[in-house]
Image (tube, grey):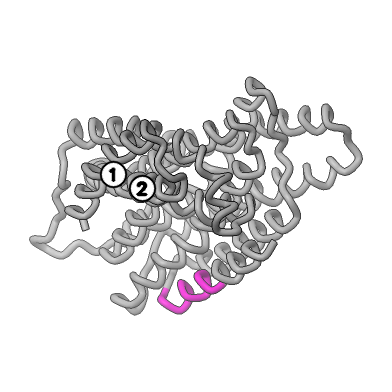
Amino acid sequence: MNKLFMIFVFIGLPLSIIGSIFHWSATIMFIIYCLTIIALAGFIGRATESLAIVLGPRVGGLLNATFGNAVELIISIFALKAGLIGIVLASLTGSVLGNLLLVGGLSFFVGGLKYKRQSFSVYDARHNAGMLIFAVIVAFVIPEVFTHTMNEQETMILSVGTAVILIILYLAALLFKFVTHRGVYQTDNTPVEPGHEENPEWGKGKAISILALATVAVAYVSEHLVSTFDVVGAVFGWSELFIGIIIVAIVGNAAEHASAIIMAFKNKMDVAVEIAVGSTLQVTMFVLPILVLLSLFFSTPMPLVFTWPELISMVTAVLLMITISNDGDSNWFEGLALLAAYVIMGIGFYFI
C-alpha cells in the first residue's frame, strides 16, 4: 500500500501540473486530482502515525486529525473563494458523517473482525459525547431555529458570534485535555506484548518535514480540484450537495480514514477513536468557525446555516456514535451499524 501511494504521488503530481497547463478534460483531471490527494494523504497518515508512537495516542490522534483536516480546510478555502458556499457546508457535513459513521464504523468493524472485543478510554468517550452534543446540536441546530426570523445581516452576526464561541471553547477543551487535566482520566487500554514495542517508521524531524511538504502539495492540487466541480457534477449528474457531502469529504479526509482503520486493526482503539471523534470536534468547533470568519474577506460571506437534511443527518450520526461508544467498548456489529447508517444517508443525499 505504501508503494502504491508513492507511485500515485510521483505520477499524479506531474500529471496534475501538466494537465492543468494543457487544459485536459475536467473529468480526467478530477480523477487525477482525487487520486493524487488521497496518495498525499497516505503520506500524511504515515507521518502522523510515527508521531503518535513518539508522542502518545492523544497527541498523535490530535495531529492526525489536524493535518487530515488541513486537506479539507485548504479545499474549502478555495471553494469559498470561488463562491461555492453550498459545497463548503456540504463537505463539512460530509466530514462529520464520514468521521463518525464511515471512519468510526470501519474502525470498529475491521478491528472487531480481528478482536472479539476492543476497549478504549470511557472517560474520553463521555467527554467527547458532551462536546459533540454542544458542537452539533447546540451550535448548529439552535442558530438555525433563530435564523428563520432574521434578515441576512442578523444571520451573519449570529453566525460570527457562534463561530467565535466555538473556537474559544475548542481551545479551552485542548487546555483541559492536555494541560489542566492531563493524565487525570487517562487509561491505557492497548495491550503491548513483550518484545513487540512498536518503533516509529520515521523520526520526529523527518515526519514533520513530510507533513509540511505533503500539505503544500495538497494545497496546489486542491486549488485545481475545486475548478472541476461544476463540469464533473454536470457529467455525472451529481448535485452540489452530493459532491460536498460524499466526494469532497472522502477525498479531504483520506488520511484520517486510513490511519484510524490501521490503528483499530493494531488494537490501538484509543488512537482510532481519537482520530474519528477528535476530527469531528475539530471540524465543527474550529475548521468550520474559521471558514465562517475567513468568508468575511471574500465576496460572498458564509453564514452558519445548514439545510434540514444536513442538520438531521449530523444529529443522528452524533446520537448514534454516542450511544455506541459511551461504554468504552466496541465490536464488529456496532461498526456495521454505523456503516449502514452512512450508506442510508449517502443514498438519500444522492437523490436530493
Q: Which is nearer the eye, 122 or 248?
A: 248
Residue 79 image point, x, y percent:
56, 36
Q: Is residue 147 left or right of residue 269?
A: right
Using the rendered image of the protein, determine whether residue 318 is visible from the camera's viewpoint: yes
The C terminus sits in image quarter: bottom right
Residue drawn at (72%, 35%) of the image:
303
Highlighted magenta segment, given as a residue range: 331-340
Q: Is residue 102 left or right of residue 218?
A: right
The secondary element bearing badge 2 is classed as helix
Residue 85 image point, x, y percent:
65, 38
Please give the residue where the numbered disc 1 appears in the rendered image: 12
Residue drawn at (26%, 37%) of the image:
14
Whichever of labels 2 and 1 marks the residue nearer the N terminus, that label is 1
Q: Which is nearer the eye, 211 or 63?
A: 211
Q: Residue furthest left?
A: 195
Within 10 Å of disc 1 (Cα), the crowding (few <14, some 14-19, many 20+) is many
Please give the residue where the numbered disc 2 appears in the rendered image: 32
Q: Which amino acid does label 1 sit on?
A: Gly
The secondary element bearing badge 1 is classed as helix
Q: What residue type is labelled 2?
A: Ile
Q: Which is nearer the eye, 284 or 152?
A: 152
Q: Does the magenta stretch include residue 136?
A: no
Using the rendered image of the protein, determine whether residue 52 is visible from the camera's viewpoint: no
Question: How far apart, in angstroms, are the residues tagged by discs 2 and 1?
Answer: 6 Å
Q: In this view, does 267 lie above or below 91?
A: below
Residue drawn at (57%, 46%) of the image:
92
Dominant secondary structure (helix, strand or loop) of the stretch shown in magenta: helix
Give the numbered dot on residue 274.
none
